[in-house]
């Protein structure tokens, strides 16, 4: 799911839950609520006595309900924290040798790496994303290969060429990369 859709969905779920909680709170405090609202006032309850006592004899019921709710809350918090985490590396720290260091923008290094990868024989399109820490970046690379490309040769060329150049130019000890290759979709040739 794209990040923008994921965040919009998270915001929408949050707004709906906030509106429902606020409406229940308003009804509980005695504010006027519409006639269709299931809770009409401070004397109304969320669970009737029959609903609360239905599983009284089963000792597992309430611990199970509480455990499920705790798991749901933890999953929701994990999802929220995953949305707030940055996927891309904003900058890479370059050791200049003078003790000061320099900073290279992550997008600039991504674009340089992708641009050089596209010049390789057998690469039609390249996308690069830098992740990790600014002192130890990692590269996620997506290469689109034409039908005639040889994946092993393309991977070797990418490792010896663009990846080695990026590692050397940023003076990194290592630049681990995860490379995913896909073939460009094409129509079958007609034989006549």
Image (cartoon, rainbow, N blue to C red):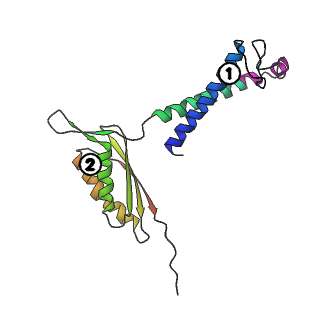
Q: Which mark is residue 167?
A: 2
Q: Across the whole image, how many numbered discs are drawn on residues?
A: 2
Using residue 115 as the reference point, say whether residue 24 is left or right of it: right
Mark 2 lies on a secondary structure that is: helix
Q: Which mark is residue 89?
A: none
Mark 1 lies on a secondary structure that is: helix
Whether the magenta-drawn stretch holds residue 91 is answered as no
Residue 96: where, in percent of width, then height?
17, 39
Q: Earlier in the sequence, mark 2 or mark 1?
A: 1
Residue 128: where, in percent of width, then height?
37, 51
- The answer, for residue 15, to whether it is visible in the render is yes
* Residue span colored magenta: 48-63
- Quadrant position of residue 57: top right
Q: Residues within 10 Å of mark 1 (few under 14, many from 20)?
A: some
Using residue 90 as the reference point, say whether residue 76 is left or right of it: right
- The answer, for residue 159, to whether it is visible in the render is no
Height in image: 158 above or below 169? Answer: below
Query: Which residue is at 46% across, 64% downward?
Result: 183
- Quadrant position of residue 29: top right
Distance from disc 2 to disc 1, alpha carbons, whole Å, reads 56 Å
Residue 25: where, in percent of width, then height?
67, 17
Q: Residues within 10 Å of mark 2 (few under 14, many from 20)?
A: some
Query: Which residue is at 18% across, 33% downward?
Result: 100
- Quadrant position of residue 71: top right
Using residue 123 as the reference point, say whether residue 63 is left or right of it: right
Q: Which mark is residue 23?
A: 1
Height in image: 132 above or below 151? Answer: above
């Amino acid at each position: 799911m794209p990040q923008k859709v994921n965040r919009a969905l998270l915001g929408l779920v949050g707004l709906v839950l906030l509106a429902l909680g606020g409406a229940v709170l308003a009804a509980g405090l005695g504010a006027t609520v519409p006639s269709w609202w299931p809770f009409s006032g401070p004397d109304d309850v969320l669970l009737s006595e029959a609903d609360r006592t239905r599983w009284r004899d089963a000792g597992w019921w309430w611990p199970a309900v509480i455990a499920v709710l705790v798991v749901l809350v933890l999953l929701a918090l994990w999802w929220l924290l995953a949305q707030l985490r940055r996927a891309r590396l904003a900058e890479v720290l370059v050791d200049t040798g003078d003790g000061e260091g320099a900073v290279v923008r992550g997008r600039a290094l991504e674009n340089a790496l992708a641009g050089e990868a596209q010049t390789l024989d057998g690469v039609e399109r390249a996308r690069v994303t830098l992740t990790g820490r600014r002192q130890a970046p990692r590269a996620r690379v997506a290469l689109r290969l034409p039908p005639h490309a040889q994946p092993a040769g393309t991977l070797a060329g990418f490792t010896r060429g663009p990846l080695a150049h990026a590692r050397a130019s940023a003076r990194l000890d290592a630049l681990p990369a995860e490379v995913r290759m896909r073939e460009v979709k094409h129509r079958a040739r007609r034989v006549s």
